Amino acid sequence: METSEFDVYHKIALSHPLFRRLSKHEKEGLLEFYFIQEYLKGDSVLFKGDTLDSLYLVLEGRIIFNSEGSQRRNSYFSGDFWGLESLTVPRKLDTPYTAAEDTVVLRLRGEGFRRFIQNYPSVKAALKPRMDKAGYHISGFPEDAWKAVKKPAGQKKGMLHFEGRTSRKSFSLFMLVPVSLILLGLILSVISSWFLVLSAVGMILAGFEVFLRNMTLYRVSDKTASKRFFNWRNFRRDQEELPLDQIKSIQVNVNGILRHLLKIGDLTIQTAGAGIVFRHIDKPKDLQKKMMELKNLQNTVSQGEEREKFRELVRDQLSGSEAAASVASRRYRGVHSQIAAEKRPDSRIFRKSAAVLFFQLFVPVSVLLLSIVASIILSGDTGRIFPLILWTLRLSAAFRILWFSLDWWNDIYKIDLPYVWDIERKPFAREEQRTQTDLSGILNVRVSQKGIVKILLNYGDVLIETPGNSGTLQFFSVARPMKVQAEIFRFRDQLMQEKEEKRKQDSLKQFGEFAEIIKQVQGTSPVKTMRI
């Protein structure tokens, strides 16, 4: 394929209804995330057992395949596409896809697509489905696919698959009591105005229920599950998040006939630790099934990538370098089209919020300033004892200021792969204590902000739950605790990727040696043994 031919295929791809409404800048960005492959007649595009984790778009030619579950032969022609739903949830193929003639196919991986919409957030509007007056789809993604991809979970967090609060049906049931009180108070107010107190109580209860529902948020991405809620008994805002790969079981609890009819229930996500509970959500059984699919998602994608690499390795070994070079010459790869390990993040250090230091220094600084003001006002003959008292207060206050400052500075929380550290040093080398835990073993990370002051000043505790007897690692009163929680999971994702990449490299090395042995054995005469 010549470069000019690639230009033709780029133009065909970017003018397709899927991508037609992208801006020029967005189209230039999309070029970096897909690749184009030419297949000769009879070549296999996808094999049975492969992982479908990409969008495939036929730019030229024809692809044939059997319908899953039957022997009926179907075809994809120029302009047809498949795998759109697999951008978010990959699946294994039960049937091969073969080129019926010389064919050119565009492939956009799910991982590359997620990075594309993260780098170009405005592209989501261009991918929104657009219909004509007759109700036919004319551009953008189909409605179902659009709903699946329009809400990415955020940078480094993958794709968002569920976001919700307490069920509206359940919320309506909770509101029956306060609404009844409001109506009863209004009706009885005809008899006496004192009954308006009932209406006031009902309004307070209704406002309280609305507040609690708005403070509750459940989210599930392809990497983590999280729960944000407000504990009104302790006036505390909490957010719990756990990695999907640590899930041991998912339990659905639906009590009562009414909850069965309304399809409302609780979903308990259990790890080796405490786990989290999604309370009063709609269709918990559907979410349970989705989460079990997501739990196995990473293994599915990883196995599919390994199959591709093994296949290329065997093809190179058995076909020779010339065949490999010819295949490479018929392929266009965008800069970011391949799944690549992200750059290893630098270590991060967190400290307690500056507000904590401010509160600690308030008293000694006040004492120091008052002693200075007192010495200025009483600058006359005050004897020897009073100046001595003032200097004692100043030195004591200065020492406390120095102590609190050093203690605040030396108490650090550090993330440095593969560990997370809690390092506590007392001032003047009095004592040092280091606690560490492996990031890969984290079961749950909980943020707790107790009290109105911590919520307003945005600082709180981060509690890291680990398996076994290691207990909980605690980051006390850190600034922006939600961001600290996100950073912990970002570093953990990187660590898990590195471990998985090392495992793949070891497997490829062993498989490469095996393929080399097969190549050496090919063409040799069988060894004859003599029986005596």
Image: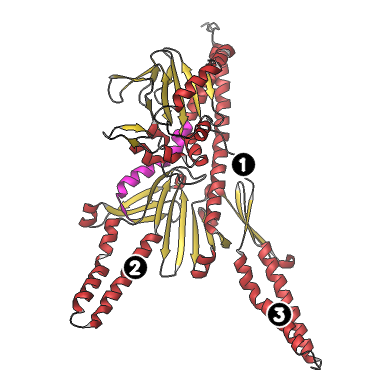
Q: Position of residue 150 (x, y in %)?
A: 41, 42
State if disc 1 and disc 2 touch (CB < 8 Å): no
- Label the magenta part by its dominant secondary structure: helix
Closer to viewer: mark 3 or mark 1? 3
Q: Counting residues from the N terminus, which is met first, the one under dot 2 or under dot 3?
A: 2
| Left or right of 24, for residue 358 | right
Q: Which element type, helix, strand or loop, lies under badge 1?
A: loop
Q: Quadrant of residue 181?
A: bottom left
Amino acid at dot 2: Gly
User: Which residue is depicted at the point 34% across and 64% down?
Assistant: 210
Q: Which residue is mark 2?
A: 207
Separation of residues labelled 3 and 1 (CA atoms): 48 Å
The part of the chain drawn in magenta is: 280-303
Q: Counting residues from the N terminus, which is met first, the one under dot 3 or under dot 1?
A: 1
Q: Quadrant of residue 276?
A: bottom left
Residue farthest front in this picture: 133
User: Which residue is depicted at the point 68% across and 62% down?
Assistant: 410
Q: Which residue is mark 1?
A: 344
Q: Position of residue 57 (x, y in %)?
A: 41, 25
Amino acid at dot 3: Leu
Amino acid at dot 1: Arg
Q: Which residue is mark 3?
A: 369
